[in-house]
Image (cartoon, rainbow, N blue to C red):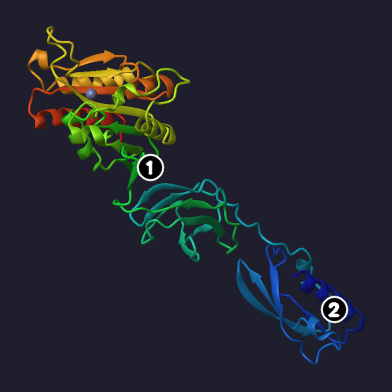
C-alpha cells in the first residue's frame, strides 16, 4: 500500500512536469475516508511517456471491502483535483478483540461457549475457531455471543478462540485461547483405585457434572458389617449430577466387608484410624488413601454412611442408630438439620425418628475431615432393626437431600 502511494506521487510529479495530455480522476469521492487502493491498471501507451505503472488511466480502489474500478478521462487540464484524497487515505479501524470467552457447559460431543458483546456498532459477526488436539481449525460465524459446538470428539482437548469482524470485513485479532474437553455421559464417571496395589485397594467413583459446584464425598463400608451404608453407596455411585463433583467410595473397607465384621480380624477399626490432631498422619494405608483423596479433590462436604444396632432414642442403649452426627463448622448444622427433618417427615414412631448430634468421635473420618481439613462433615447412622430396603432407603434419602440442598441433583 505504501509502495503504491509512493509510486503514485512520484509518477504524478513526472506527469505534471512533462505533460502532454492529462488524466483526471474525477470520480473519486472527496472525503474518501477508508479508501485503500489495491491495484493500478496497466498504463495506456498513448499517455505520457513516463513510468508505466504510474499511469492512472484506470485504478481499482477498495471501499468497505468492495473493489471499484475507476476509469479516468483524458483532458488538457493542468489540475489534479481528484488525487488529493489519495494522500489522506487511511484504513478504517478494525473491531476490538472479543473478551470473556469461556466454556459454560460441557456435554456429549458438545461444548457451549460464550463471550462478551463487542462495543462496536458496525459489527457484522464473530468467527469462532476450534480445533481438537492434533487436528486443524474449523470455524463458525455467528452474530450472537454464544454458540453450541456439537459433533465434537469426546475426550479430545479442544482449543477455542474468537475474533470480531465488522461490516467492512475488517477483523480483530483472535482472543486468548480457551481449552475444554467434551465428555459423553458415560465418561463423566471415572473409577479410581485408592490404595492401589495393596490388599486394601478400593474403588472411588469420580462423577463430574462438567459444571462448577461443590465437591461432595459419600463413603460407605468403613465398617464391614453395616450393610445398608455400602448398599446405598453402591447405588449412589451410579448417580448423575447437575453441577459440581460427586466422589463415592462405596465399599471403603474391602477386607471388613468380606469378613462381614466391623474390622477384619487382626486389623484396626478404620473409623479410629484418622488423625486426632492437625499434625498427626492417618494410621493405616487405607486411612491414608481416603484422607489423601479428600485433600486431592478439595472436598467440601462429606457424608459417611454407618449403622447402629439400636435406636438412639431407646434409653436402654447407647447406640447411635437413627442419628446424623455433624462436625460443627460453617453451615453444616443447617444442612444436617434439613436432612433430619426431611427423614423424620416420613417416620411416625417417635423412637424411630432421627436425632441431630454433634461431634463425630475422635479418630473418625468425619471428625478428622471436619476438624483438620475444613470439610463440612457428618456421619449418618441408621438403626439396623428395620429391613435392609428400608434402611438403604434412609441412606439414599439422606444423601439425596444433601445433594438437592446443594443444587447438585
Ligand atoms: Zn459404623
Outermost residue toward the top in this view: 315
Q: Secondary structure at mark 2?
A: helix
Q: Residue at x 38, y 34 (%)?
A: 289
Q: Is residue 352 above or below residue 23?
A: above
Q: Which mark is residue 106?
A: none
Is disc 1 in contact with disc 2, using a CB cutoff of under 8 Å? no
| Mark 1 vs mark 2, CA separation in Å | 65 Å
Compare residues 320 and 246 and report the one nearer the observer: 320
Outermost residue toward the bottom in this view: 46
Q: Quadrant of the C terminus?
A: top left
| Residue 339 percent coordinates (x, y) | 23, 23
- Tell which circle, 1 or 2, labels the residue nearer the N-terminal end: 2
Q: Secondary structure at mark 1?
A: loop
Could you classify mark 2 by the number of other residues whose Cα lies within 10 Å: few (under 14), some (14-19), or many (20 or more)? some
Compare residues 371 and 148 and report the one nearer the observer: 371
Q: Is mark 1 within 8 Å of ligand 1?
A: no
Give left or right: position of 119 versus 267: right
| Residue 374 percent coordinates (x, y) | 42, 23
Q: Residue at x 86, y 89 (%)?
A: 49
| Image quadrant assignment for residue 317 | top left
Q: Nearer the viewer, mark 1 or mark 2?
A: 1
| Image quadrant assignment for residue 405 | top left
Q: What residue did someone put label 1 on?
A: 211
Q: Is residue 66 above or below residue 354?
A: below
| Residue 257 percent coordinates (x, y) | 21, 34
Q: Is residue 181 above or below residue 298?
A: below
Give left or right: position of 389 versus 143: left
Ligand 1 occupies quarter: top left
Q: What residue did someone put label 2 on?
A: 11
Q: Is residue 329 above or below residue 202?
A: above
Q: Is residue 208 visible?
A: no
Amino acid at each position: 500500500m505504501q509502495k503504491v502511494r509512493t509510486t503514485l506521487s512520484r509518477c504524478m510529479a513526472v506527469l505534471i512536469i512533462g505533460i502532454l495530455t492529462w488524466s483526471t480522476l474525477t470520480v473519486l469521492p472527496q472525503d474518501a475516508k477508508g479508501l485503500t487502493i489495491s491495484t493500478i491498471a496497466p498504463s495506456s501507451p498513448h499517455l505520457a511517456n513516463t513510468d508505466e505503472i504510474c499511469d492512472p488511466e484506470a485504478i481499482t480502489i477498495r471501499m468497505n471491502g468492495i473493489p471499484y474500478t475507476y476509469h479516468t478521462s483524458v483532458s488538457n487540464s493542468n489540475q489534479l483535483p481528484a488525487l488529493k484524497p489519495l494522500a489522506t487515505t487511511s484504513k478504517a479501524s478494525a473491531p476490538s478483540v472479543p473478551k470473556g470467552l469461556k466454556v459454560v457447559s460441557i456435554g456429549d460431543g458438545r461444548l457451549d461457549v460464550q463471550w462478551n458483546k463487542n462495543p462496536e456498532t458496525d459489527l457484522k459477526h464473530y468467527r469462532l475457531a476450534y480445533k481438537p488436539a492434533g487436528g486443524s481449525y474449523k470455524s463458525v460465524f455467528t452474530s450472537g455471543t454464544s454458540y453450541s459446538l456439537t459433533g465434537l470428539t469426546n475426550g479430545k482437548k479442544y482449543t477455542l478462540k474468537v475474533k470480531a469482524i465488522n461490516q467492512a470485513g475488517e477483523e480483530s485479532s483472535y482472543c486468548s485461547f480457551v481449552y475444554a474437553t467434551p465428555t459423553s455421559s458415560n465418561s463423566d464417571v471415572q473409577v479410581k483405585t485408592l490404595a492401589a496395589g495393596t490388599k486394601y485397594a478400593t474403588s472411588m467413583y469420580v462423577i463430574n457434572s462438567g459444571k462448577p459446584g461443590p465437591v461432595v464425598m459419600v463413603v460407605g463400608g468403613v465398617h464391614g458389617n453395616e450393610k445398608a451404608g455400602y448398599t446405598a453407596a453402591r447405588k449412589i455411585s451410579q448417580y448423575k449430577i447437575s453441577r459440581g463433583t460427586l466422589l463415592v467410595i462405596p465399599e471403603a473397607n474391602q477386607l471388613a466387608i468380606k469378613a462381614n465384621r466391623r474390622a477384619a480380624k487382626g486389623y484396626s477399626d478404620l473409623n479410629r484410624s484418622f488423625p486426632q490432631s492437625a499434625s498427626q498422619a492417618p494410621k493405616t494405608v487405607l486411612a491414608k488413601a481416603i484422607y489423601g483423596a479428600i485433600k486431592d479433590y478439595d472436598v467440601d462436604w462429606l457424608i459417611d454412611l454407618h449403622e447402629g444396632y439400636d435406636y438412639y432414642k431407646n434409653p436402654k442403649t447407647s447406640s447411635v442408630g437413627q442419628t446424623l452426627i455433624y462436625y460443627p463448622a460453617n453451615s453444616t448444622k443447617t444442612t444436617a438439620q434439613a436432612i433430619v427433618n426431611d427423614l423424620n417427615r416420613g417416620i411416625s414412631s417417635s423412637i424411630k425418628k432421627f436425632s441431630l448430634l454433634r461431634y463425630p468421635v475422635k479418630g473418625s473420618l468425619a471428625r478428622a475431615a471436619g476438624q483438620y481439613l475444613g470439610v463440612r462433615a457428618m456421619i449418618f447412622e441408621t438403626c439396623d432393626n428395620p429391613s435392609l430396603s428400608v434402611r438403604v432407603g434412609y441412606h439414599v434419602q439422606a444423601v439425596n437431600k444433601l445433594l438437592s440442598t446443594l443444587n447438585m441433583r
